[in-house]
Image: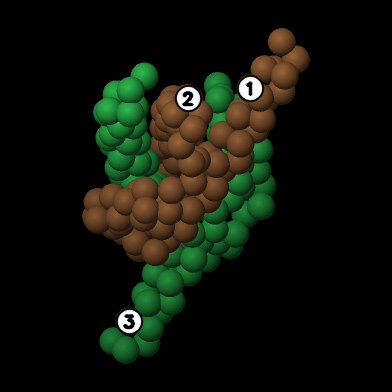
Chain colours: A brown, B green
Amino acid sequence: MTQEEAAQQLARHRQSIDEIDRRIVACLNERATVVEHIGRVKQQMTMPVYEPKREEDVFRNVTENNPGPMPSDAVRRVFERIIDEMRTLQRIRMQNAANAEKGS
Amino acid sequence: MTQEEAAQQLARHRQSIDEIDRRIVACLNERATVVEHIGRVKQQMTMPVYEPKREEDVFRNVTENNPGPMPSDAVRRVFERIIDEMRTLQRIRMQNAANAEKGS
């Protein structure tokens, strides 16, 4: 493989990665929207935001549906971060909603 | 909303999340496969695995293509984890390849 061929291959692979990453971003936002719907239902019913059993279901779903090559513990760590970010987002939204309520 | 209606809505939303999560897992594995291709090109050409400039391009791609509701700093943190896990995977693979080489 010449330097030029290698550079071309890398460029092509990086385009693929950028395209995959944009799909992941779309999925994250789709997920955040559903999490917001769940938050509203829970708020209306005064249910707890944090449910450890449900989190275990989420981890089970992703590790049982993981064909690789990503190891399942790596997939789990990525989802720990995703869930953590979603929880932070939900907390901010609920705080804002509560403040808006107070202000109205 | 009755308790039963709330439970039904939550169940439906959770099904959506599980389906989105399986799509994310598929993307992560697709990404890991492309990263392996990149690793092989780099190994053949004895190029460095870690390229900070490329990582910044990855973060720029995902934050510039983020319509929300996920804040861009949250998206960036999720991708920091993804990149970190991919790097670990690549290191393990290269180590295994080197060991196989030694053994042959």
Circle 1 residue = A97
Q: Is residue B13 above or below residue A52?
A: above
Marks 3 and 1, how far apart at CA: 58 Å
Q: Amino acid at mark 1?
A: Ala
Relative depth, front residue between B83 and A8: B83
Residue at the image position 43 percent from the left and 53 percent from the top: A52
Q: Quadrant of residue A70?
A: bottom left
Q: Are marks 2 and 1 in contact (CB under 8 Å)?
A: no
> x%, y% of residue A29?
48, 29
Relative depth, front residue between B9 and B29: B9
Please state, as top left, top right, bottom left or bottom right, where the N terminus of chain A lies in the image: bottom left
> x%, y% of residue A15?
46, 36
Question: Mark 2: which secondary structure?
Answer: helix
* Chain to which mark 2 belongs: A
**Residue A59 visible:** no
First-in-chain label (2 vs 1): 2
Foreground label between 3 and 1? 1
> x%, y% of residue A95?
66, 30
Please tell me how crowded label 3 is: few (under 14), some (14-19), or many (20+) other residues with Cα within 10 Å: few
Instruction: Give the left or right position of residue A51, taking residue B59 as reference.
Output: left
Circle 3 residue = B100
Q: Amino acid at mark 2?
A: Gln
Residue at the image position 28 percent from the left and 87 percent from the top: B104
Question: Mark 1: which secondary structure?
Answer: helix
Q: Is residue A76 above or below residue A10?
A: below
Circle 2 residue = A44
